[in-house]
Amino acid sequence: MKANDLNAVNTKIRLPATLKWASINLVVSVALIYCFQLLNVDPTARVKYLVYLPFVIFLLLAQSEKKKLQDGYITYGEAFSSGFLYSVFTGVFITIFIYLYITQINPNVVAKFMAISKHELENNRDLPADQVDTTIGMVGSYFSVIVAILVLFSYAGFGAIASLISAAIIREERPPFDFIANDTAASPDVVI
């Protein structure tokens, strides 16, 4: 074996920070969803928005790790793209889980949500009973797809907004005359 081959074997494979923190957020979100289920929390309760708290914390951690990997410097664009990629990966992971949860793991959630929606439509709207039944039937047949799309876009949208804000806070640009030690092209020869 050559020395280069040994270095390749000993090199630690590093999962990008965005994927790592998105995976951790998936685990935390799944745990929260099962806690809500065990505690019999109403699906329409506002406590369900608690899953966004770890989302924001892990977004900041993903951006901070990217900054740390770049010697403590990160531009606004790099911080935003890191946070947005984290948001998209999280959205995809959560969407896949939610779709499987609704269709395979616990399809009773759909029936429970439809019953709550039907009750609200009957009591709060001036709709005839047949129109309520038609609406509930149409939404029920596409419920899992609708929820999956809404989850994906809500995570991406919320993540874009959170990334814009957090990138402004976390950014620390490299001073203009601070050259990278390993970059020979970045160290100019000054001729006077």
Image (cartoon, grey):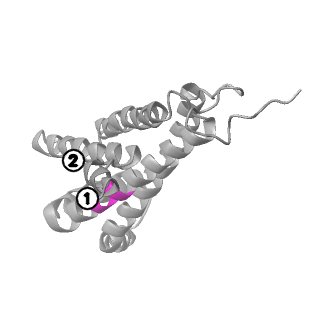
Residue for badge 2 = 30
Res 42 label: none
Place of residue 90 in the rendered image (x, y in percent of width and height, measured from the top left): 37, 50
Secondary structure under tag 2 reads helix
Where residue 24 appears, x then y in whole percent?
27, 43
Res 40 visible: yes
Task: In the rendered structure, find residue 97 and report the number of the disc placed on it.
Answer: 1
Amino acid type indicated by mark 1: Phe
Give whichever of 191, 122 is nearer the camera.
191
Where 19 sits versus 138, above or below? Answer: above
148 or 3, nearer to the observer: 3
192 on left or right of 29: right
Is disc 2 in contact with disc 1, using a CB cutoff of under 8 Å? yes
Q: Determine crowd level at label 2: few under 14, some 14-19, many 20+ residues with C-alpha closer than 10 A.
A: some
Identify the magenta region: 92-98
At x 85%, y 30%, the residue is: 191
Q: Main secondary structure of the magenta part?
A: helix
Residue drawn at x 30%, y 69% as measured from the top left = 140
- Relative to 180, residue 96 above or below: below
- First in sequence, mark 2 or 1: give its number: 2
| Quadrant assignment, res 128 | bottom left
Q: Amino acid at mark 2?
A: Val
Q: Quadrant of the C terminus?
A: top right
| Residue 178 drawn at (x, y percent) | 65, 26
With 145 as the anchor, is 110 left or right in this view? left
> Quick check: is 139 in the magenta stretch?
no
Task: Rate crowding at label 1 as few (under 14), some (14 to 19) or many (20 or more) other CA atoms within 10 Å.
Answer: some
Residue at point 31%, 53% (across, down): 3
The residue lying at 21 percent from left, 41 percent from top is 32
Image-based side of 108 in relation to 62, left or right: left
Q: Residue 155 location, x and y as percent?
A: 43, 49
Circle 1 sits in a helix, a strand or a loop, which is it? Answer: helix
